[in-house]
Amino acid sequence: MRSLFLSLLLTLAVLAAGAQRVTYSINETWRFHKGEAAGAEAPAYADEKWEIVTLPHTWNAQDADDDTPGYYRGVGWYRKHVRIGEEAARGQTYIYFEGANQETDLYVNGRHAGHHTGGYTRFCFDITELIRPGQTNVLAVKVDNKDNPDIPPLSADFTFFGGIYRDVYLIHTPAVHISTTDCASSGVYITTPEVSERNAEVNVRTLVDNRSGRKSRVRVENTVYAPDGTRTVQASTRIEAGGGTTPVVQEKMTVPQPALWSPDAPNLYRVVTRLYDDRTGALLDEVVNPLGLRWFEFSADKGFFLNGKHLKLIGTNRHQDYLGKGWALDDIVHVQDVRLLKAMGGNYLRVAHYPQDPVVMEMCDKLGILTSVEIPVVDRITENAAFEKNCLDMAVEMVRQDFNRPSVVVWAYMNEVMLRPPFKGDSVRHAIYGRNVAALARKIENTIRREDPSRYTMLPCHGSFPAYDDAGLLQIPMIVGWNLYQGWYSDTFPAFDRVIDRFHQRLPDKPLFITEYGADVDPRLHSFAPQRFDYSAEYANLYHRHYVKAIMERDFIASATIWNLNDFYSESRGNAVPHVNNKGINGLDRRHKDTYLLYKARFNPEPATMIGNAGWRVRGGAETAPGECTQPVDVYSNAKTVTLCLNGKSLGERPVRDFYATFDVPFADGINTLEATGDNGTKDLLRVDFRLVRRNPGREFRELNVMLGSQRYFEDPEHSQIWIPEQAYTPGSWGYVGGKPYGKPTRHGAQPASDNDIYGTRQDPLFQTQRVGLEAFRADVPDGQYALYLYLAELEGDPQREPLAYNLGGDAVGPKSTGKRVFDISVNGIPVLTGLNIAEEFGASRAVVKKVIAEAADGKGLTVSFGKREGEPVLNAIRIYRIY
């Protein structure tokens, strides 16, 4: 009897559970085909030969990072056979997409279930009438990421990866339930019109959907639970739900002495919304939303205030990319990224340039990271009704989907929208375009404020004040953001101070954000004479040290966000790492750059001491004193003083100024152990494999790796090699004879390296500098047999590259061309390559490595000579390796 009773209870529990909401992912074993597939929506379509993939998935993970310009933008098909249980017959079934780029059509058992436009917001389709409960159902999804002038973004400095790149879920609910289809929101909207340290007022608006075909008496209950789990306040309302959607508003739920939400104490309440059958008391549906009790305001002069206290918002922007995966990321990567920001000491994330995975927002809520979120209107607009509708739809989706996030304080739109106006050469048409941009901005602004009057709005601009002022854009949003790169794309560091002070003076009543600033870093590149656009870690360190100091000195700068938290893919870029924007303070693989350490020492209050350039494990350099090479090493710390030891011997104690100290370290050949100790008790250890290059090559000579026309060091971690800067030849040593470094001319002065994508290599920096017009390279090495590797590339005349608007004038002016370049190369007087024309034989921007076996005899060393025929001879890098 007891067994029968337990069995009955279990059955009732299962039935009760089946009557409530069930949500689960359906990410596994999808069939995928890249390209059009006529009839692929049909259940019987033969997809056995299609690739099997797991979501999240993108079809651009490889072709957006190869040597072929461009990447596939078009249609991709996904199909899945999924069994849906018989319990689905008792209610509603929905399919929920967290994101697919950029147009999506869903077919269920051959019938069209819905269409969504936009690659970054979530969407949900009701498939109740299309499924067969208790059977296998066929889902077919057509996704298209082709360029469409009606859909933002039209262009941007990031790769538009195609595919279903976020999770997909099935949701089963009773016929009467909390809405899932109001822009794929939770169906519950929470506002806190009054919050203080004494009391907080909570209002909840719940959308009840009735798909039963008859009126239903239900009870809507909202319960607020404190961070410790105790019930704080509850409201209950009985309604008669007719067909369609019925809104239920419960107001003035009072939370006494609230635990306030802030970066230091991200206290999260929970609002649990339950829907009951008023006749039987059975629980029908339940939805949980976060609640953070806080109040905030922005001041044009004093910046940001949270809960009545001044708070400088410091953080980063974030793109949703990872090395080798594009946008197809598991949840753990999103979690990791927000934790990276928090560990850095950041308290603010600009979610740019589009809404991102809900896990990102969840983590910001939980860790106390304030955010802005924006729709992907980037660079320019299309002046038509379809583009306008899509912008407004995206704005509504963005606000409703993240409406309840305590982390969100700003909604944004139109990033750098005047950067690439299509009619700049026609003043009349340009003025009309500006008015149309402003008209659209007002509509987006009004839409967002109508949807959410409690938060601020922002328009991020590039650094041309007149471009936005003339169009009438600067008075529309509540906040103006500025993307400023003085000292990188143009000018010098102090120009940033002058520009931002001037902008504040011209908009004295408008709160101001520095929405972007940064400098590209390839962590393989280093220089002790850093220059703008050399991509070295050292130049970026100088850049960020200046910016952070200027930002912290100005109260009117409410927020500053580094561009970017991590490196991200931008297929059209060249630079030191082609197809990647390297302004991240972490790499695509999330390895820290020195800039991350600088911010961590400055903004994370936890005691820390960190040796800089920790990823530079294979170092090298020319001898500065017998048996050693002295190079600077930075130590980042929030201690007052730090001590650095080399191989157990102290190099002294240094005061920490601006959160770092610099030591001159005399590295010896071989393994060197560095240990840094702060007076706050923190330590760090680093082992460096140092390859010493003797000033006068002797019998122990093994190899020499030199980049010509460069003052940079290049670590090739893939091959455990270090390349060092060039030097002029002196007798008994090694170096170049004659010529000059290649310089890329731009409107803002010559850049020290080409930013061409060098085809056929991943070691692009070896080919992006060169010495032009050199006569020879000499090395007074001991007698023996050697392998000479001559690295060559033609850096001019690449027809596949177009100027990037994002370089803001950093592209080459010209065209600059040497015309035909033909020269001879000989080694120790023996002709090796005659009539060499790199461009004609191999093409422009193509990596060429010529290996030559040569003998050094009679104490004469090695001489590589260059004979001019037409144009100027060039050499990009040279490796000399001793065989015997």
Image (cartoon, rainbow, N blue to C red):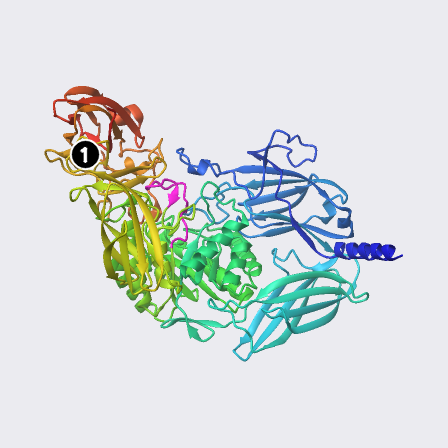
Magenta run includes residue 212: no
Quarter of the image where one finds residue 753: top left
Q: Name the amino acid, label 1.
A: Val
User: Is residue 492 in view?
Assistant: no
Look at the image and give the residue range highlighted in magenta: 563-581
Mark 1 Cα-neighbour bin, 10 Å: few <14, some 14–19, many ≥20 = many
Q: Classify 224 as above or below 634.
A: below
Asked whether, in this view, residue 686 is left or right of residue 259, the answer is: left
Which residue ends up furthest to the front in the rendered image?
648
Q: Which residue is mark 1?
A: 772
Q: Quadrant of the N terminus?
A: bottom right
Quarter of the image where one finds residue 435: bottom left
Q: Classify 378 as above or below 287.
A: above
User: Residue 585: image x %, image y %?
Assistant: 37, 52
Magenta run includes residue 576: yes
Asked whether, in this view, residue 324 is left or right of residue 243, the answer is: left
Which residue ends up furthest to the left in the rendered image?
731
Observer-nearest residue: 411 or 668? 668
Circle 1 SS class: strand
Observer-nearest residue: 615 or 834? 615
Which residue ends up furthest to the bottom in the rendered image?
198
User: Residue 450: image x %, image y %?
Assistant: 54, 66
